[in-house]
């Protein structure tokens, strides 16, 4: 499908000037086989395949806006995308009235059938014309997973960072605490071309570790993230767990505003966009709503299954 998408993208005529309705889509994908979400020429991307699927349905090219442009290899369970489709098409083919907050299961199935096994459209819903998948979002939550099982399971290689351990969980939790609140995260971001210097302010509202046997996960939530921010943070926290950094070094990095001395990025395979939040009058939360307090199951004894 990748080759077909790149050849087909842009091959349709522009959208005709007809009444349109805004539709939000819930998209999940295994990012291992994609070069990120954003549409790019001559490479397979989630956005490229979704754009092609929607053009097949609409009969013309469509514009997409997503909640978060995930990088190559990064996954999503709750990517949110909005698109404007003709009201007449929705009524004729999918029996939709075009009103906000109307669920469109037939449209979701039609999109899903075209996306293949590595991506899925799990929801299609009418939204108000002022809804913007990117700019209307009030929070995004990412989860990063570590696999510490001493007996490797190759099936986990696409969705977790495998580490041999042991890791100091208490130190990693202590190092995560200073991330809360508004800070200059320049030390943990890849700078955008238009911002060669200066602070990169982001406000983190949640950051904590959970343990479920050999699987450890780190949840972090903020209104917005800068490029590679979560992978950079996880790389630093793992370095703390391994004893290569101290929790106070994370604070020092935050204050430095420089990537000099920052650990290597965590690999993309462990990262997943799991939740996007919107105001209640624009539809509320899409995706997982985790329990308010971290839960924990004991790490099994060495060699246990």
Image (cartoon, helix red, strand yellow):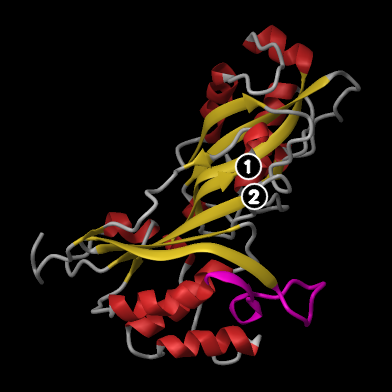
Secondary structure found at label 1: loop
Compare residues 205 and 220 and report the one nearer the observer.
205
Considering only order in the chain, which callout, 1 or 2, is on the residue closer to the N terminus?
2
Q: CA distance from mark 2 to mark 1?
A: 5 Å
Q: Position of residue 274 (x, y in %)?
A: 48, 49
Name the disc covering residue 170, or none. none
Residue holding disc 1: 278
Q: Residues within 10 Å of mark 2 (few under 14, many from 20)?
A: some
Quadrant where the image shows the N terminus? top right
Give the vertical position of 269 relative to 25 (above or below): below
Residue identified by numbered label 2: 138
Q: Residue at x 69, y 53 (%)?
A: 42
Residue 241 visible: yes
Q: Is residue 74 above or below residue 99?
A: below
In the image, is residue 292 above or below residue 216?
A: above
Report crowding for label 1: few under 14, some 14 to 19, many 20 or more residues within 10 A (C-alpha): many
- Image check: 63 left or right of 80? right
Q: Which region shows up in magenta?
A: 180-200
């Amino acid at each position: 499908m990748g080759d077909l998408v790149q050849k087909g993208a842009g091959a349709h005529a522009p959208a005709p000037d007809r009444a349109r309705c805004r539709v939000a889509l819930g998209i999940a994908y295994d990012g291992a086989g994609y070069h990120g979400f954003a549409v790019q020429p001559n490479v397979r991307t989630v956005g490229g395949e979704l754009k092609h699927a929607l053009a097949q349905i609409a009969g013309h090219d469509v514009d997409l806006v997503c909640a978060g442009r995930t990088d190559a290899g990064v996954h999503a369970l709750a990517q949110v995308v909005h698109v404007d489709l003709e009201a007449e098409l929705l009524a004729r083919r999918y029996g939709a009235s075009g009103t906000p907050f109307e669920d469109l299961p037939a449209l979701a199935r039609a999109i899903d059938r075209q996306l293949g096994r590595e991506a899925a459209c799990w929801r299609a819903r009418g939204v108000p014309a002022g809804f913007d998948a990117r700019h209307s979002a009030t929070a995004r939550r990412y989860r990063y997973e570590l696999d510490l099982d001493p007996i490797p399971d190759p099936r986990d290689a696409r969705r977790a960072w495998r580490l041999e351990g042991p890791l100091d969980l208490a130190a990693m939790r202590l190092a995560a605490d200073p991330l809360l609140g508004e800070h200059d995260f320049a030390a943990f971001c890849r700078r955008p071309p238009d911002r060669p210097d200066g602070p990169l302010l982001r406000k983190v509202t949640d950051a904590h570790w959970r343990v479920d046997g050999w699987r450890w996960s780190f949840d972090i939530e903020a209104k917005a993230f800068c490029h590679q921010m979560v992978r950079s943070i996880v790389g630093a926290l793992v370095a703390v767990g391994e004893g290569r950094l101290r929790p106070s070094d994370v604070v020092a990095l935050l204050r430095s505003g420089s990537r000099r001395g920052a650990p290597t990025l965590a690999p993309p395979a462990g990262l997943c966009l799991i939740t996007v939040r919107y105001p209640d009058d624009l539809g509320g939360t899409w995706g997982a709503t985790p329990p308010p307090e971290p839960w924990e199951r004991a790490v099994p004894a060495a060699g246990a299954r």
